[in-house]
Image (tube, rainbow, N blue to C red):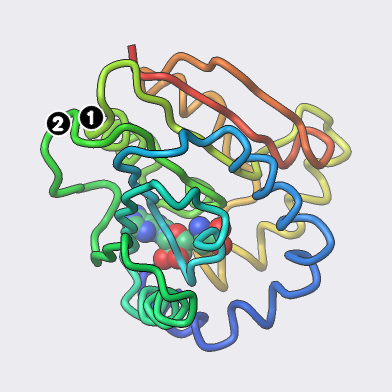
Amino acid sequence: MSVARKYDIASRFYDAAEGFIEHRFFSKFRKRLFEMIPPNGRILEVGIGTGKNLSFYPKGVELVGVDFSAGMLKRCQEKVKELGLKNVQLQQMDVERLSFPDEHFDAVVSTFVFCTVPDPIRGLKEVRRVLKNGGRAYFLEHMRSEKWYLNIVLGIMHVCTKTLLGTSMLRKTRDNIEKAGFTILHEEHLLSDVVRLIVAERR
Ligand SMILES: C[S@@+](CC[C@H](N)C(=O)[O-])C[C@H]1O[C@@H](n2cnc3c(N)ncnc32)[C@H](O)[C@@H]1O
């Protein structure tokens, strides 16, 4: 089954299943990321999912959200309506094949996405392509640790997450961001070195 299809199915219970971890950790991490976001401009969010970041965006931003799962986008659209947001446009699209022109966005946001994108370097290269020169991409991602004992725990989790959602717990996402041609400007370790906030620039 494709990863997009797995997320279509998961979309029905995704928010409920993540409720505890979202409340305890992720919402704080999202708040931290959004303290850094520019107050206006055209922003692309890739893998927008059910729209957990929607309420964090500054009012002046024109947001385009993409995801390859129709199910996740449907939930997101419901949230856009509930929140009464006017400046949000959603499109079903694969981050590995973005249909936007080069240098189209002022900034890009990605939260917990590149653990799942089937070809992460290809997706990250696309993110870089659509970002204006000097524009920044803001990543909140979990990844392989530099501590061997944490990687044992992550390896056990990986067996389940890979099967259920196509999600890897062992990706070297920091390295992948650099391999895609970005310059890393800022890195914060939010949950040991497993969950990281990374700000990277297109130069
Ligand atoms: C773990 S969820 C995170 C959702 C959301 N960003 C959040 O912070 O809650 C990963 C999301 O990325 C999407 N995704 C994964 N690979 C993708 C790809 N190649 N293109 C577009 N969306 C993708 C999935 O459909 C899913 O909605």
Q: Residue at x 54, y 49 (%)?
A: 111
Q: Quadrant of ligand 1?
A: bottom left
Q: Earlier in the sequence, mark 1 or mark 2?
A: 2
How packed mark 1 is, by other alpha carbons closer than 10 Å (few <14, some 14-19, many 20 or more), is many
How packed mark 2 is, by other alpha carbons closer than 10 Å (few <14, some 14-19, many 20 or more), is some
| Residue 79 rendering spot, x and y as whole percentages | 47, 77
| Residue 46 rendering spot, x and y as whole percentages | 38, 51
Split into 4 quadrants, where in the image is the C terminus?
Answer: top left
| Residue 49 rendering spot, x and y as whole percentages | 46, 66
Q: Amino acid at mark 2?
A: Asp
Q: How far apart are the alpha carbons under marks 1 and 2?
A: 5 Å
Split into 4 quadrants, where in the image is the N terminus?
Answer: bottom left
- Res 102 label: 2
Identify the residue position indicated by label 1 in the image: 129
* C-beta proximity under 8 Å, tags 1 and 2: yes
Location of residue 144 with respect to 65 vertically, above or below: above
| Residue 84 rendering spot, x and y as whole percentages | 42, 75
Q: Residue at x 47, y 28 (%)?
A: 176
